[in-house]
Image (tube, rainbow, N blue to C red):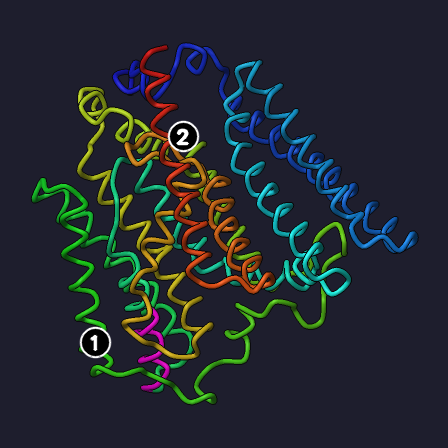
Amino acid sequence: MSRLTSAPTTETAADRARPPGADWRVGLLRVAALAAAYLLAVGILWLSAEMATRWHLGWFPLVGLAVDIGLLVAAAAWLNRRGHAVGASLGPLVALLGVVFVFAAADWLVNGEQASFWSMRSLRTAAVQTSTIAVAALGMTMIIIAGGIDLSVGTALSLAATVLAWGLDRGWGAGPSIVACLATGCLAGLINGVLISLLKVVPFIVTLGTMTAYLGLGNILAKETTVRPARSAVPDWLPSLVTPLPKPPWLWNPVVPNFGWGVWLALALAALLAALLHLTVFGRHVVAIGSNQRAAQLCGINVGRTKVLVYALAGLFTGIAGMYLFTRLSSGSPPSGRGLELKIIAAVVIGGGSLSGGRGSVIGTLTGAAIMQVIASGSTALELRNATQDIILGAIIVAAVTLDQWRGRRLERG
């Protein structure tokens, strides 16, 4: 352990001087600060909406959104000046609110009183549609922080959904079928991790190969078709995973929006992953490997075993995302995962994750997934073509990667 704590990539002198339990106290203070900031932001939005209703000014909620953006920018600048790493993680949130503001303003200018983008109904729908990508991207966050990549996540996700559909269609019942779905995702990740560790081949090549293999396995299981279990075989609670509004509403609006329970499950998984990365030795090992694998080995970290665990745990998130995918499609289709890996990786990159490894955040990943969905929802509200959506999203991805490279060069010079 002493060799580990002496590693510059895993623990600084300030960290070593921190008393036992300080991480938990700092974590609780951060949670309290985030809760206070959230209540302030929601309060401003609620007040602006009430004023808009009273004064019959449909555009006035945009003022509240602009105020929230301004406060967030000021907070990020203040934290950066004081050297807090949290300040940098606020960047994706500022970008998200900025994208929301642009589309909300454009929707109001184009559609006037018929504007529907900036509404609670639109927010609920967007949140549910984001969940599938967000859950899978949480697992990808770990992989990218560890300096890896997984191109097979899309087909592994659809394979897990196909296994769930196949199990329900064969009369296994909900419990065993869901366990098989999660186990499939976990096994797919485990295979990736073992191959990468044993063969010493770059993750890009290994997962490029398993991407095709998982698609083939799915097609064999589904017999080159779509598996559609009978409605009676699907439990009533499973479709509610992607229902925009729970029935009956069970939370206090507007402080806590009444999202479907699938959204809250995604947020709970995000909180667990954040705790794993920030409050455990395993999380420090993941960051250390991504920052400098050679230094991590010299510090006594079992790099191979850690990578296997990272990919297996990420596979578990992929299996959960497969459950989301099945509930959205009400079927299992192996080709349905093609292309999803690009969106999943993009969510991490847009959220500030570095493809060079060593950097990434849970909040950033959730924000990146939300930005992509906001672009899709806003483009639909403005009746923009899919090609335009792709161009906008591509430009944002290029900008995010460019910013990451610029930040890396700046750190090297500094």
Q: Is the residue marked by circle 2 packed among few (<14), some (14-19), or many (20+) residues within 10 Å?
A: some
Instruction: Identify which residue, 324 or 27, lies in the foreground.
Output: 324
Residue under pointer 2 = 403
Q: Is residue 169 magenta?
A: yes
Please state if 20 lies on the left or on the right of 192 as rendered: right
Majority secondary structure of the magenta segment? Answer: helix
Q: Amino acid at mark 1?
A: Asn
Location of residue 82 by image quarter: top right
Please state if 51 lies on the left or on the right of 134 as rendered: right
Above or below residue 390? Residue 114 is: below
User: Which SS class for mark 1?
Assistant: helix
Quadrant (top left/top right/bottom left/bottom right) for the C terminus = top left
**In the image, which residues are magenta?**
161-170
Q: Residue 398 at x, y = what percent?
A: 37, 40
User: Which SS class for mark 2?
Assistant: helix
Q: Is residue 129 magenta?
A: no
Residue under pointer 1 = 219
- Of callouts 2 and 1, which one flags the residue occurring earlier in the amino acid sequence? 1
The disc label shown at residue 375, or none:
none
Above or below residue 206? Residue 66 is: above
